Amino acid sequence: QVQLTESGGGVAQPGGSLRLTCTASGRISGIWPMGWYRQAPGKQRELVATIIPNGTTNIADSVKGRFTISRAGAAKNTVYLQMNDLKPEDTAVYYCKLVRFGTDQWGQGTQVTVSS
């Protein structure tokens, strides 16, 4: 069984930065596509950023130029989401996802609140 653990959420002021970390643990081998999604109150969960094993990334237009996704190493299922120039509309629960054998595995989520 695979577990995803997110960390790094918290409260930031507008214009501030946070870095989220997601680590996959358990019975897992190989490198898998991973990504970050977020869900604000009353809204649907939306894609923020994804990264596939060859390092190609996909960033949502709403955060492009402010957020970056990266992997801890070419052979690691640990990904980071660097969030800069945070805005109040970035407030949400951020979830990590790993796709393995066509199945989505989700973390429990970490709260990010952007407020002055």
Image (cartoon, grey):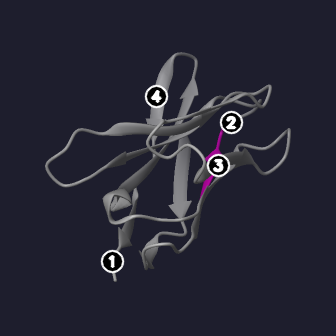
User: Was residue 15 drawn as part of the magenta stretch in this picture?
Assistant: no
The residue stretch that appears in magenta: 21-27
* Viewer-side residue, 79 vs 30: 79
* Viewer-side residue, 116 vs 33: 116
Say above or below: 20 vs 46: below
Name the residue beneath numbered marker 1: 115
Which numbered marker is on residue 24?
none
Q: Secondary structure at mark 1?
A: loop
Q: Residue at x 53, y 75 (%)?
A: 16
N-terminal of the two: label 2 or label 4? Answer: 2
Name the residue beneath numbered marker 2: 28
- The answer to whether 12 appears left or right of 115 in the picture is right
Q: Main secondary structure of the magenta part?
A: strand
Q: Marks 1 and 3: in contact by CB < 8 Å?
A: no
Name the residue beneath numbered marker 4: 104
Amino acid on which disc 1 is placed: Ser
Name the residue beneath numbered marker 3: 68
Q: Secondary structure at mark 4?
A: strand
Say above or below: 42 vs 35: below
